[in-house]
């Protein structure tokens, strides 16, 4: 399994809006992607920092949806909410509890 983290900085007063957009738009769109296994959104309401974690069957599945433009399309939905360019990182999941 592979995890993609997207680390974001958002406007503090738009955390609820971002959470709703993630739940109602990003997650349903992700479910149609090959290899998708699940997603979490973690936020710090005091600072506006957030981390999206999506899980994929493989690194190849995660990379494929980036190359297709899917990932960029999802990030673009938050253009009026984010205050900095998101940082994307990927990790192999070696332990699952």
Image: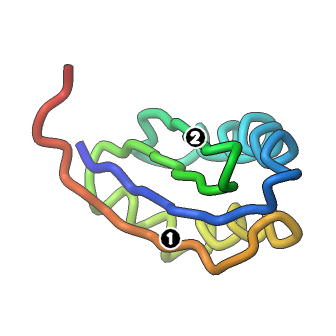
Q: Which residue is drawn at 87% across and 51% down?
A: 13
86 with respect to 78 (left or right): left
Task: Determine whether the residue tagged by mark 2 lies in a helix, strand or loop.
Answer: strand
**What scheme was used to colour the molecule?**
rainbow
Q: Are marks 2 and 1 in contact (CB under 8 Å)?
A: no
The residue that label 2 is drawn on is: 41
* x then y, percent, for residue 89: 36, 67
Q: In this view, does 18 lie above or below 77?
A: above
Residue with the most extreme front position: 46
Residue with the most extreme left position: 94
* x then y, percent, for residue 94: 11, 41
* Label of residue 52 in the image: none
* x then y, percent, for residue 52: 53, 49
Residue placed most toward the observer, 62 or 15: 15
Tell me the quarter of the picture where residue 63 sits. bottom left
Task: Determine whether the residue tagged by mark 1 lies in a helix, strand or loop.
Answer: helix
Q: Which residue is drawn at 61% across and 74% down?
A: 69
Quarter of the image with the C terminus is top left
The residue that label 1 is drawn on is: 66
71 with respect to 16 (left or right): left
Residue placed most toward the observer, 48 or 37: 48
Tell me the quarter of the picture where residue 74 sits. bottom right
Earlier sequence position, callout 2 versus callout 1: 2
* x then y, percent, for residue 70: 62, 65
Residue placed most toward the observer, 86 or 26: 86
Q: Residue at x 54, y 48 (%)?
A: 33
Q: Residue at x 50, y 64 (%)?
A: 65
């Amino acid at each position: 399994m592979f995890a993609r983290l997207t680390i974001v900085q958002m406007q503090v007063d738009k955390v609820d809006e971002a959470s709703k957009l993630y739940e109602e738009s990003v997650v349903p769109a992700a479910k149609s992607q090959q290899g998708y296994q699940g997603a979490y959104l973690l936020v710090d309401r005091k600072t506006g920092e957030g981390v999206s974690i999506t899980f994929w069957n493989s690194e190849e599945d995660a990379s494929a949806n980036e190359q297709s433009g899917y990932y960029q399309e999802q990030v673009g939905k938050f253009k009026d909410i984010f205050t900095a360019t998101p940082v994307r990182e990927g990790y192999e999941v070696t332990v699952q509890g």
